[in-house]
Image (cartoon, coloured by chain):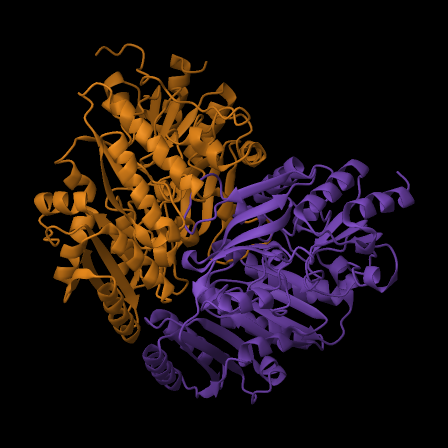
Amino acid sequence: MSAPDLAEMLAAIVGREHVAGAGAERSAAAVDGILPRWRVRPGAVDEVSRILALASSEGLAVAPRGSGSALDLGMPPARVDVALDLSRLAGIMEYVPADMVATVQAGVRLDVLARELGKHGQMLPLDPYGGASRTVGGVLAAGASGPRRFRYGTGRDLLLGARFVQVDGTVTWAGAKVVKSVTGYEIPKLLVGSLGTLGVIVEATLRLHPAQPASGSWLFPFPSRDHAASFVAAVLASDLEPERMAWLNAAALARVGQEPSEAAVAISVASVAEAVASQGGALDALARSSGGRVVALDEEFWPGMNAILDAPIVVKLAAEIRRLSFWAGELQKLCAHHGLTAAVVGEAGNGVLRAGVTGSVLSQDWAREVVSPLRDGLAPEGGSLVVERAPVELKHAADVWGPVPEPALAVMKRLKAEFDPRGILNRGRFVGGL
Amino acid sequence: MALSPAFLAELERIVGAPGVVSTLEGRLAYECDMHTYYKGAPDFVVLPESTAQVAELVQLCRRERVAIVPRGSGTGLIGGAMAPVGGVMVSMTRMNRILDLDFPNRCATVQPGLINLWLSQATREHGYYFAPDPSSQMVSSIGGNASTNAGGPHCLKYGITVNHVLGLELVTGAGEILRVGGKAVDAPGYDLTGALVGGEGTLGLLTAITVRLLHVPAGVKTLLASFSAIEDASETVSAIVGAGITPAALEMIDEVFVRAINEGVGAGYPKGAGAVLLIELDGPAAEIEAQAGRIVQICRDHAALEIRVARDEAERALLWKGRKEAAGAVGRMSSTWILQDAVVPRSRLPEIMREVVAIGARHRLVIANVFHAGDGNLHPMILYDDRVPGELERAHEANDELLRACLAMGGSVTGEHGVGLDKAWSMPLQFGDADLAFMARFRRALDPDSIMNPGKLLPSHPACGEGFRPAAPRLPTGTWV
């Protein structure tokens, strides 16, 4: 089918005003500099279905997107025909506060949802970096998470059910709309973090949590990484129950306007007021015995951490929890060696670090002397390094995902071959060229 | 050579002769799980001791197109660990070691046959425990828990098994040794760890599981509140959750059970109560004190007859004893019952409880209820006497009606027991053809020749919505009764 015909078909599905084949709207939907032929904004699940059916029959490459904040994630695509913009699918379909469950469309923004849930004293504890303007579907598909995962888990723990559209347009449901269900395979878990490569999430049923009546946040700066690490270990070995526990290095502290120190740990506690006060006191005592001090923070500190990752390169490192401090140091050191500054922030209780990296580096050096040594070192403990954002030349120099061991990769390839044999959905952007 | 003497010789070569059960009386011990209605003995039972042996067994069975049925402790309630079409049952009871305890990383790696409670016993003195606590935890295995994605009273706050599994080693139906996840989270690629939990042995055989350990909470507070009417208790549940409190457990015990438990276990639940709520809070002392105060007030506002707060561990154990031994206590009233595990949205509890009573009356059957009220997971036990003609059939009808009523309210077929053979037929009530076809294709990617636990989890013909439902138990050749 010719390009004008395809444009007409897309317009017939979503309406002419929701197909951008030129102009700024289309340009803004570029993925790693690759312009889509059309940016298409469906307003209903049925429209998503018809777009994908068309894409399948015409062999069009589709890149689904929500707010666009995770478009940097993944390898550069060879081609994008349809940027499938889900931001108009923004309905809160079902919300029964007494069930603590909400079913929302994929394009609902986290901040919009938070306002609605807040009216009933509830929340969705997904706080990915990149801010509250991100969409539910995008956050789930990208497997994004933030500091609150320490207490509440990630999308895999909060997504109870999902409606998704398979590549041929088949609208499919998986999971349940109740907080507890083991009926059938855990397909929702397969979708979380799959970057839309197996199907496009259009609706999510989410487990909610009560917002706590009181909270407190503190920053504990330490003279060295070792001091901070011993504090983290002490908190983890205690019966304290923090909500968030973030690791920050000196560069990260500078980005959030805090006084410099070699390493710091930011912690929040959410509970009844009495428990916030008593846990705050206990944390203070632990920090002092680990050679640290305490700075009171307000709740605004947490969204403010987004500034740390506002950088041209963002890497995510996952390791054993007890090795977090070591890897924070390695990351910082290897970057510094090549004139790069790494502002490191991490989920200290989960073994996850991210760094916003600034400065310029040769592609070769990046691949061989930063990424490779870190991956080699992380492999024995099952850790990983994902380059979540980087200029295209760096992405080509070092696979952003890193290796996936066999036979896991073979199984993933079989799944992709089963559910998207022609590679319509985000082809080439996911692990192992999937 | 399938199932021939040569096949038996191969099994013996792989696991050693003592690791193979081939006698009739030996195999009959494996003919069912705790759902004794479904019987089917395997042709052979093998008890491997290593992942390598498991892989070799799967490769052999794949080559010979012989069905494989995994089995942990056999405490499942869904007709999962039984062999409706015969084949080889792989029992994991000899793979029961703790491979690694790693407190700084808050995790443990265990073999699938390890008993659930043993892990918490091994870690508690270090201040940690394994959160999933199915009531079978004294005997059920962690491999079985992960395969069925088991729950338990405390999953209201802490989630079901999948929320505690960090990594797996699984021999797929294709015979590969697949290692996914582990101590480091967020491995790039699809979350196979999450997607493989709850596979009920239809995707492969678990050979090692890395699970999260939680720190033992600073304090625990257990309350028991009795009500004259179950409606009041149901509304109390909603009010507690509505107040922003997430108890560790929130269990409902109905009148029938209160009576049975008092007579059988002597837990001393308030006599004449129409319903009892068992409420447990855990966490920092200041938090649970404040929440307990609030809960007492909520219970009073909902006309509680009596509220008890356990003062020490002994009192707490006594309050729980009745709940944990409920199924046994009911055995005094009836030796045969059907246990339902469907879920409703929590807000529909009062409504579904009225429906349960109506269904029981309609079929002239006693339905006893003890369940996880906090998450809407019902466990009605439909009591019947199989010596009374027609009573079993009525019980089945009541069970089906109950399940349909839960689904009509937006619920789910199973909250924590799993699907197995028992509920495979009902999958089309919750899922459409496309949904089931997606699951079937997922299964095929892991088990290309359909040798893994056939007949379980998915209806045999998803398209026409008909599942395998044995009219009569299958008896092995040569059995005489």
**Chain B appears what colour?**
orange
**Is residue B254 something that shows in the picture?**
yes
Location of residue A376 in the rendering, given as x and y in whole percent from the top left corner: 60, 59
Q: Is residue B58 left or right of residue A11?
A: left
**Chain A appears what colour?**
purple
Location of residue A422 in the rendering, given as x and y in whole percent from the top left corner: 74, 38
**Is residue B202 something that shows in the picture?**
no
Q: Name the residue: 43% across, 86% down.
A: A292
The residue closer to the viewer here, B307 or B110, is B307
Quadrant housing residue B421? top left
How many labels were placed on the picture? 0
The residue closer to the viewer here, B153 or B272, is B272
Q: Is residue A285 left or right of residue B324?
A: right
Q: Is residue B330 left or right of residue B141?
A: left
Instruction: Classify the position of the N terminus of chain A by image quarter.
Output: top right
Quadrant housing residue B382? top left
Please, is residue B419 above or below residue B102 in the view? Answer: above
Q: Name the residue: 17% across, 20% down.
A: B387
Please, is residue B24 above or below residue A275 in the view? Answer: above
The residue closer to the viewer here, B223 or B454, is B223
Location of residue A107 in the rendering, given as x and y in whole percent from the top left corner: 65, 58
Location of residue A159 in the rendering, given as x and y in whole percent from the top left corner: 51, 53
Q: Is residue A158 left or right of residue A62?
A: left
